[in-house]
Image: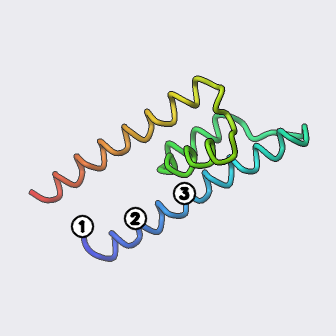
Amino acid sequence: MNPVMGKLLLIYLILINLAAFCLMWADKRRAEKRIWRIRERSLFLSAALGGSIGAIAGMYLFRHKTKHPSFVIGMPLILLFQTGAGLLLFLKLMH
């Protein structure tokens, strides 16, 4: 991977994780105010698009969705899959 692509990937990952973190925060605030909520599929999509670390951090920092097995199990599984895929891609690029 050339340096420009590497920098763009890093910027993307920072932004998507920040977005996932902010979505968790916003949904928690909306839950407290009992107003319109962010769909669970949107929270999972933000994690699946590369924001799993931000989503997990938001879950536990804001104590949001931590009693939902689909989140407690699903978010780490997404992170595990992404880590494995990233490692495989890295190893493929090194050869």
Q: Which residue lies furthest to the left in this view?
A: 95
Q: Is residue 82 left or right of residue 52?
A: left
Q: Position of residue 1 (x, y in %)?
A: 24, 67
User: Badge 3 is on which residue?
Assistant: 16
Q: Which image quarter holds the C terminus?
A: bottom left
Q: Do the residues labelled 2 and 1 touch (CB within 8 Å)?
A: yes
Dot 3 crowding, Cα within 10 Å, few <14, some 14–19, many 20+: many
Give residue 77's quadrant in the image. Answer: top left
SS at badge 2: helix
Kindly identify which residue carries mark 1: 1
Amino acid type indicated by mark 3: Ile
Which residue is the site of mark 2? 9
> Which labelled disc corresponds to residue 82?
none
Q: What residue type is labelled 1?
A: Met
Q: Foreground residue, 93 or 84? A: 84
Of badges 1 and 3, the one in the foreground is: 3
